[in-house]
Amino acid sequence: MKDLRKIAIVYDFDSTLISGNMQNADLIPYFGISSSEFWEGSNKLMKEKDMDEVLAYMYYFLDIAKLKKKKMTKALLEECGKKIVSFYPGVVDWFARINEYGKAIGVEIEHYVISCGYQEMVEASCIAKYIKKVFASRYMYNDKGEAVWPAYVVNYTQKMQYLARIEKNLTDKLYESGPINTLIKKSEKYIPYSRMIYIGDGCTDVPSMKMVRSQGGYGICVYDKSSKHGLVMADQLTKEKRVDVTVEADYSEGSELDVAIKKMLKKMR
């Protein structure tokens, strides 16, 4: 049987698959502070020390843990990941549905997540079984499973590195930088950018959307209709023509997003 043509759908996570940030619901409350207090403190640290935004929040969690005399552990992140329930409408059954649709039109869909959030939390969530690879920020741990230092940090520019890794099927051994920069023939590419759909919600996704779209793929901006900031961002990206489609973050069958992606898949097959 002939192999089906592969297409990658690449997702941001926070405010793309779930409402808000993954850390808000269970992780931040575990340390006894509110989400607003945490992010205000993290942003203050970022500006005072001129830090990368992701490194700032990862450090700030360790700082808060010490202050509260608690531990930031891999087990804690995994437990919080299991509790994520703030998925947008249709997300939980989206992957199985769109995979079946793909097969019906002769394509095989692979799903990837590239997130500035925690890898451990995404990999412990209920949708992880559908994701081929999660690229996200994570800690290095000691022999007790306690976080001691950032192992990987994903920010808005580094997201593009992982698109290149998907293209060349270099999704393991992230410490190896040589192969990702090796020039390969178009016929040797695992999934070229022209067969990628990138779904995100804002500024941290713009470079990745631009990269994918410049090579013939598609960029989709999703927004939470209850979020004023989300609506403003979606409107801005649309006016600036940085995305192909702007739709509500509703993955239900028959939704605008569902219809738009199916049209894109048909064009790519």
Image: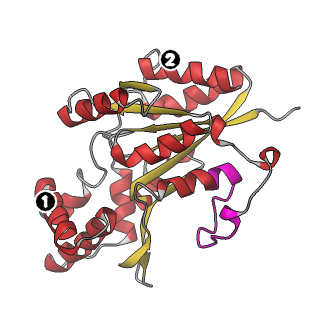
Residue under numbered circle 1:
40
- Asked if 79 appears above or below 110 in the picture, the reply is below
Q: Residue at x 65, y 36 (%)?
A: 194
The residue stretch that appears in magenta: 165-181
Report the Cα–Cα distance between label 1 and label 2: 38 Å
Residue 254's tag is none
User: What is the three-letter code of the residue carrying label 2?
Assistant: Val
Across and down, in percent, residue 53 comes to 29, 63
Q: Secondary structure at mark 2?
A: helix
Q: Of all residues shown, which one is farthest toward the bottom?
A: 143
Figure quadrant of the C terminus: top right
In magenta segment, residue 177: yes
Residue 40 lies left or right of residue 167; in this view the side is left
Q: Of all residues shown, which one is farthest toward the top?
A: 254
Across and down, in percent, residue 268 comes to 67, 26
User: What is the three-letter code of the residue carrying label 1?
Assistant: Glu
Name the foreground residue: 95 vs 14: 14
Across and down, in percent, residue 182 comes to 72, 63
Estimate how packed mark 2 is, as few (under 14), some (14 to 19) or many (20 or more) residues with alpha carbons within 10 Å. few
Residue under numbered circle 2:
259
